[in-house]
């Protein structure tokens, strides 16, 4: 069985490289083709590539493991990001397209341009940390499968994962990501529902699951809404982790700019966002429904793999494993190409060689992909807790960037000095947390946000007001947006 699994996984990987290679010639025509697909993507490409990215293998494994251990309310750790994503869609997508902003750092440098656009550096750091922890999260999820299936050294499994995903992503850039995400997004969705059906069948029906939790007096663990303390937990997730998605990820900004029209960008984001909010319920309840079947000695990270190979036929088990592989790869590649664009657009093009041509920028984007994969590789080796990786990365970016981002749209008083000082203070706060090895949790994230916001506001208030021309470049109610529709027709 393991030999057959290895063969089909290798064949699947070969198919991914073929899909990537198919777009090589087109992707290498220009930097815009390599990083933004020539701004030509239609709505179905956009919808499926978002779905492939947002429901990653790391999310599936982590969410199922989390709800298995703590109940269905763990759903809100990830679902809160979708709720805040609706604000990003309705408030900002059409304005981002109006300003032709390729990266989040472009937004910050447009509004806070002083000191030679130095603000790009902390923004790049914040987004890169978010990306590489996400990459590490996916690497860890796939590594768990390799170690379970083939009983190989964990570090070797991480290395194999790194080489595979880095290889096909760097080959043809965003075209590789989109092409493979369309294919992999469909597979992973089928696999999720198959796993849910198998779990219910293994329990011999939903009634037996309910009886199990009733006998333990833990019926509340079956509830996403209404369980003990669920609302306070929901609010904590929403205002600490979820709030980051009012800005959204760099990869989402790439897709917004890659869309062929405003309508495609808006609905291509909103439709999969709604689907994702519902689909996250599936791994949540897979984990909850696994509890009556599980053993207290099972590693939550390997819960699904153990179940698949103990309950499914060999052919079905192999198919579901392939769908989990697809979920991991479709998420990791998106964060890698996003980091590559940050490296070429926000570092090389701005501070190293302002006259870099398309060929050189593509080269540096590839180097950024490889570098992000390497750092993700290091995270995956040293941190095995998948949810901890997700929380660490998103907390870091949230504390560092969200106050300055919100002020860029809505404040007339925030200036470059204030935002940089607020970022420096919040960065020092995060370093202190990590130095003392405190676990980053929602309370620490909220505290960091308040520190950043308070210092940014205070320094801006007591220093020179920003030039009104700089303010109006991004001011939400500025005249350049007077004819922009939040919901494009």
Image (cartoon, rainbow, N blue to C red):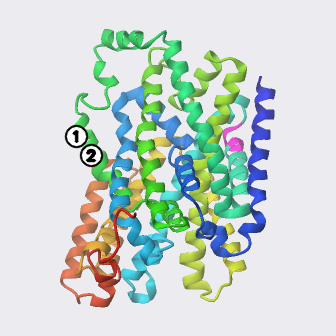
Q: How crowded is mark 2: few (under 14 residues within 10 Å), some or many (20 or more)?
A: many
From the image, give the main secondary structure of the stretch colored magenta.
helix
Between 6 and 43, the one lying in front of the other is 43
Q: In which quarter of the image is the C terminus?
A: bottom left
Please give left or right for residue 180 compared with residue 85 in the image: right
Between 217 and 451, the one lying in front of the other is 217
Question: Dot 2 corresponds to which residue?
Answer: 236
Does the magenta-highlighted stretch encompass residue 244? Answer: no
Between 76 and 485, the one lying in front of the other is 485
Please give left or right for residue 331 compared with residue 441 in the image: right
Q: Residues within 10 Å of mark 1 (few under 14, many from 20)?
A: few
Please give left or right for residue 141 compared with residue 278 in the image: right
Q: Look at the numbered discs 1 and 2 and tell me whether their residues touch, using CB distance below 8 Å.
A: yes
- Res 198 visible: yes
Q: What stretch is highlighted in magenta?
A: 153-157
- Residues under labels 1 and 2: Cα distance? 6 Å
Between 99 and 449, the one lying in front of the other is 99
Name the residue located 60 percent from the left edge and 68 percent from the top edge: 36
Q: Which mark is residue 232?
A: 1
- Res 440 visible: no
Outermost residue toward the front in this view: 489
């Amino acid at each position: 069985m393991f030999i057959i699994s290895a063969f089909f996984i290798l064949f699947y990987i070969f198919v991914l490289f073929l899909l990537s290679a198919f777009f090589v010639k087109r992707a290498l025509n220009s930097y815009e083709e390599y990083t933004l697909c020539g701004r030509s993507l239609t709505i179905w490409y956009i919808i499926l590539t978002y779905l492939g990215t947002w429901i990653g293998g790391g999310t599936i494994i982590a969410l199922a493991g989390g709800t298995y251990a703590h109940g269905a309310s763990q759903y809100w750790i990830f679902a809160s990001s979708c709720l805040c994503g609706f604000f990003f869609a309705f408030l900002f997508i059409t304005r981002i397209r109006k300003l032709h902003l390729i990266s989040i750092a472009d937004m910050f440098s447009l509004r806070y341009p002083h000191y030679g656009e130095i603000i790009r550096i902390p923004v790049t750091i914040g987004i890169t940390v978010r990306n590489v922890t996400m990459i590490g999260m996916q690497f860890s999820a796939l590594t768990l499968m390799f170690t379970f299936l083939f009983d190989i050294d964990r570090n070797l499994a991480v290395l194999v994962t790194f080489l595979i995903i880095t290889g096909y992503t760097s080959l043809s850039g965003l075209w590789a990501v989109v092409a493979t995400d369309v294919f992999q997004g469909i597979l992973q969705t089928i696999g999720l529902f198959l796993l849910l059906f198998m779990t219910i069948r293994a329990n011999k029906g939903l009634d037996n699951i309910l009886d199990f939790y009733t006998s333990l007096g833990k019926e509340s663990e079956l509830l996403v809404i209404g369980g003990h303390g669920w609302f306070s937990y929901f609010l904590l997730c929403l205002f600490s982790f979820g709030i980051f998605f009012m800005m959204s990820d760099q990869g989402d900004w790439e897709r917004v700019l890659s869309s062929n029209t405003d309508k495609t960008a808006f609905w291509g984001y909103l439709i999969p966002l709604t689907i994702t909010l519902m689909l996250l319920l599936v791994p949540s309840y897979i984990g909850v429904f696994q509890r009556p079947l599980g053993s207290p000695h099972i590693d939550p990270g390997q819960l699904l793999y153990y179940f698949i190979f103990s309950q499914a036929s060999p052919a079905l088990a192999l198919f579901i494993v392939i769908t989990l592989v697809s979920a991991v790869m479709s998420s990791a590649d998106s964060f890698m190409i996003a980091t590559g664009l940050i490296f070429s657009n926000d570092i090389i093009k701005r501070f190293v060689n302002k006259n870099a041509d398309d060929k050189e920028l593509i080269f540096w984007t590839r180097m950024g992909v490889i570098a992000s994969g390497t750092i993700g590789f290091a995270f995956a080796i040293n941190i095995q807790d998948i949810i901890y990786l997700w929380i660490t990365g998103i907390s870091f970016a949230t504390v560092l960037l969200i106050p300055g981002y919100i002020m860029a749209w809505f404040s007339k008083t925030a200036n470059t000095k204030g935002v940089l000082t607020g970022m420096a203070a919040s960065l020092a706060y995060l370093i202190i947390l990590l130095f003392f090895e405190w676990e980053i949790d929602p309370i620490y994230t909220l505290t960091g946000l308040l520190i950043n916001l308070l210092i940014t506001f205070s320094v801006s208030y007591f220093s020179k007001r920003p030039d009104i021309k700089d303010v109006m470049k991004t001011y939400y109610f500025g005249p350049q947006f007077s004819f922009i529709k939040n919901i494009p027709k």
